[in-house]
Image: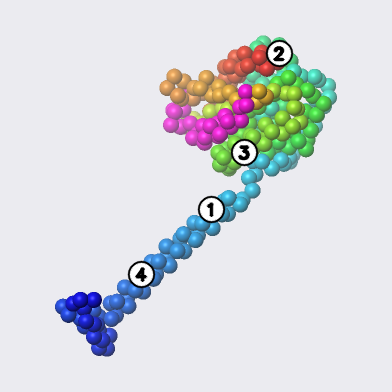
Amino acid sequence: MPGFEPRFLRGTIFYQGGIFPMFRITNLLFAGAIVALGFSTLTTHAQDKDKKTENKPNPAIKAVPRDGGWMKRHEKYLEQTQKNKYDVVFLGDSITDAWPGGGKDAWTTTLKPFNPGGYGIGGDRTQHLLWRITEGKELDGLSPKAAVVMIGTNNAGSDTAEQIAEGIKAVVMALREKQPKTKILLLAVFPRAGAPKEAKVATKDQLNKKIPQINAIISKLDDGKMIFYKDIGPKFLTEDGGLSREVMPDLLHLSKKGYQIWADSIKEDLEKLTK
């Protein structure tokens, strides 16, 4: 290299115009190696973490039963199925389970003409409803014209939006296989929020952010033939997008007013699906 004629003398490099102490060069090389090793380790750790996440089974799609009194509820539904011939079945968790409670008036007035049957169990996640449909054979023997499905909110605390959406899809596909003649009204997961108890209305920013993500995915299940997706969530919200305790007292479960909104929102859909 022009202008660079190195000569070595006990730890020093001499060249025209200056001197490089060898110990400085050694330190720089050592530091560079440490930094490179650090980046390599971080990258490998991140890749391993991603692989573990990808390879981890999705709990939302594995059909499993629950313990305790849950099995007794399931057995009662088996008896209910044997004794009735419903034209419409409602499948879900505690929100569906409470139709005979807070939703009694809307059920007996708005929905009764459709000859409906409720199959909701409080605390159920997608994997539990999936078990009831498949292994539990809860609907075997029935041939309803339509099934209203709203499930997934209880998965929100532990599963990702993608996992929950897969769980909901598994439920829908199981219904299609077990009840091929039944048209499915798949409802978007209802909005929910977290806010101080003294707040009468949860603001838009306090709504659960995972719910819209789930709904965006499951909306694609609508085929316009046997699966019909509908989002009635906005009907529960205030004009500015908040969630009032008048509709959901605990910002999750529906009030009498909330159930009437639900019933009114799907009435026309049920009329079409049950023709």
Q: State which region is magenta.
A: 199-224
Cα gap from disc 4 to disc 3, whole angstroms: 46 Å
Q: Which residue is under mark 4?
A: 32
Cα gap from disc 1 to disc 3, whole angstroms: 19 Å
Instruction: Give the crowd class for mark 4: few <14, some 14-19, many >=20 residues within 10 Å.
Output: few
Instruction: Give the crowd class for mark 3: few <14, some 14-19, many >=20 residues within 10 Å.
Output: many
In the rendered structure, the answer to whether residue 129 lies left or right of residue 40 reads: right
Kindly identify the amino acid type of the residue bearing the numbered disc 3.
Answer: Glu
Q: Please tell me whether residue 227 belongs to the stretch shown in magenta.
A: no
Kindly identify the amino acid type of the residue bearing the numbered disc 4.
Answer: Gly
Q: Which residue is under mark 2?
A: 275
Q: Which residue is under mark 3?
A: 166
Q: Position of residue 146 (x, y in %)?
A: 70, 21
Image quadrant holding the C terminus, namely top right
Kindly identify the amino acid type of the residue bearing the numbered disc 1.
Answer: Asp
Say which label, 3 or 2, has the lower sequence index.
3
- Taking the spot 44% from the left edge, 19% from the top edge, the residue there is 239
Q: Nearer the viewer, residue 230 or 115?
A: 230
Which mark is nearer the camera, 3 or 2? 2
Cα gap from disc 1 to disc 2, whole angstroms: 49 Å
- Taking the spot 27% from the left edge, 85% from the top edge, the residue there is 11
Identify the secondary structure beneath mark 4. helix
Say which label, 1 or 3, has the lower sequence index.
1
Q: Residue 50 — which label?
A: 1
Q: Residue 163 — which label?
A: none
- Taking the spot 36% from the left edge, 69% from the top edge, the residue there is 32
Say which label, 4 or 1, has the lower sequence index.
4
Residue at the farthest front position = 2
Instruction: Give the crowd class for mark 2: few <14, some 14-19, many >=20 residues within 10 Å.
Output: few
Identify the secondary structure beneath mark 1. helix
